[in-house]
Image (cartoon, rainbow, N blue to C red):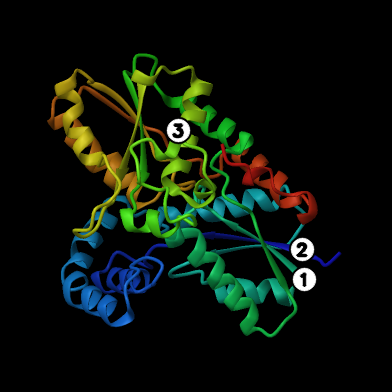
Amino acid sequence: MPKRGILLVNLGSPTSTSIRDVGRYLGEFLMDPYVIDSPWLIRKIVVSGFILPFRPKRTAHAYERIWEPSGSPLLRHSRELRDALMQRVPLPIELAMRYGEPNIGDAVRRLVDAGVGEIVLVPLYPHHADSTRTTTIVAVREAAARLGSNVSVSVIPPFHSDPGYLDALTASIRGVMPGDSQLLLFSYHGLPERHITSADPTRNHCLKSPDCCDKPSPAHATCYRHQVFATSRGVATRLGLTSEQWRVSFQSRLGRLPWLTPYTDQVIDRLPTEGVTRLTVVCPAFVADNLETLEEIGLTGRERFLAAGGEHFTLVPCLNADPAWVDVLATWCSTPESTRGSAARAS
């Protein structure tokens, strides 16, 4: 058996809150064809002409609200997760970001230099999306190929319905959700509807009917929308919630294309008018706290909810380096490839 090494990859963040660094990060992110799936010239015109002249300043201000003395919260939490995993798994372990630093190429090189023959890639995204998992897998395999080595890359599959992951997520919610909370809102990072339909291998299932996510289909293996509902139902069942006590919404939309609905900001604005004044929000699309959880939901979302008449707002932290989550990761990373795969089971 070749010597195995572990590569954890998260999405990334800028190196500082300066408008220049934020603009550089956004440019790298948005020019990825898996993020904006248009031809290069159109993508370049949109990103350089309509997004980068304006968005970096606004995004830099948002980062300033959550930036820590040590830098990016996402990077700190990801490093702490790596360090905790290193205490559990006696294998070389590296951390990289799909965009920004630490970069994938350097991390892969360090593993190869350590004598690794099989890289176990752990994309730190529970649900399949081309803009997260696919682009990460492609980038890691390209980095390994550029080294000209014989190292192989095996990939931990989407873990949206893995029992260990769901148990850890449920326990984290139970630990902070007030007993008098009226609603648990599962807020997931949004995707353009076009990303959902383009990932459908059948080309005739996703978004073709209101209940498409409830109908068995091979499309569910790559359907982000189906998988986020699977996560939400799995957690709600574990918490003993009725259908009236939880909802799903989608945040962080960009541009004018149709995105998955309902939109989190609109749901938060509307809930107090429906009698929900004590709200708990969890963001299971992320395993480490970042701009979208800390600023978009924890600060701006809270402000919107209270301004609309809400009384109490609770944000559930991401799993970060929670010991139960580290245990789950350690189990996956310690399992030989031939027997690995429980996380691939879709509900």
The kind of residue tagged 1 is Gly
Left or right, 130 with respect to 165, comes to left
- For marks 3 and 2, the one nearer the N-term is 2
- Residue annotated with mark 3: 232
Residue 97 in sight from this viewpoint: no
Q: Is residue 218 depicted above or below 135 in this figure?
A: above
Q: With respect to residue 15, does 223 lie above or below?
A: above
Q: Measuring 75% from the left and 72% from the top, which residue is drawn there?
A: 114
Task: Please state which amino acid type lies under the numbered disc 3.
Answer: Ser
Kindly identify the residue that appears in the image at 46 percent across and 25 percent down: 236
* Rendered image quadrant of residue 166: top right
- The picture places residue 102, in percent across and down from the top left corner, at 51, 69
Q: Quadrant of residue 180?
A: top left
Mark 3 element type = helix
175 w.r.t. 23: above or below = above
Are the residues at dot 1 and dot 2 in contact (C-beta closer than 8 Å)?
yes
Q: Secondary structure at mark 1?
A: loop
Q: Which mark is residue 4?
A: 2
Per the image, label 2 sits on a secondary structure element best described as strand
**Of the pair 120 and 68, the residue shown nearer to us:** 120
Label disc, if present, on residue 62 of the rendered structure:
none
